[in-house]
Amino acid sequence: MIKSWLIIGGIVLLVGFIGNCITPNKSQWFRQLKRPKWLTFESLIPLIWTVIFICGAWSAYIIWEHNPNTDSTRLMMALYLLLEIFTIAYTPVMLRLRSLTIGTILGGTGLLICLLITLTVVSVSLPAALLLFPYLLWSPIGTYTTWQMSRLNPEAA
């Protein structure tokens, strides 16, 4: 039998791979946009998201192992998957539509989904809930940054 952590990790990698494959080659548009002066950590963003995805997958693993193969756990896994899809969709959808407003909406929606998951899993496992805190801390920063960029680049809003 395949270990649950392998399945969860594999799904995280698969969704990320698909998101990368459907991302249009329009990053030049995004690179030329004005950024807030305080945005000095942009090169760290891929590392930050990698850590966040690892923490999210670990959280999902803890929840799965707590009560595997039940309807409530499957529903939780669907919420984790929905969160990853919204998070991964940020780049390809924003680039395809050339809309920072859409990016802001996707970022805010991801934050709300993560908050819902956190509030749900805290009663099952405190460690699983705590592993979602990196997302809850970073997502508002990323969403705010995208919103600020839309104000600096009204033609791209």
Image: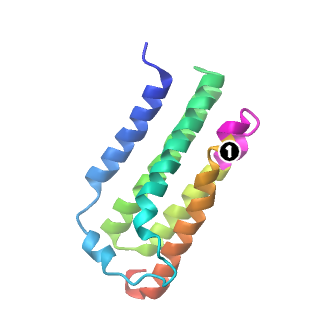
Residue 45 place in picture, x, y as percent: 44, 62
Point 47% across, 76% down: residue: 40
43 relative position to 73: left or right: left
Residue 119 is a magenta residue: yes
Residue 78 is a magenta residue: no
Point 57% across, 20% down: residue: 69
Residue for badge 1: 130
| Disc 1 element | helix
Three-letter amino acid code at disc 1? Leu
Q: Main SS type for the magenta part?
A: helix
Point 38% across, 86% down: residue: 155
Q: Residue furthest left?
A: 25
96 relative position to 101: left or right: left
The structure's colour scheme is: rainbow
Q: Residue furthest right?
A: 123
Q: Is residue 40 above or below residue 151?
A: above
Q: In this view, does 157 lie above or below 129?
A: below
Q: In which quarter of the image is residue 126?
A: top right
State the extent of the magenta-drawn residues as a range: 116-128
Residue 140 place in picture, x, y as percent: 59, 65
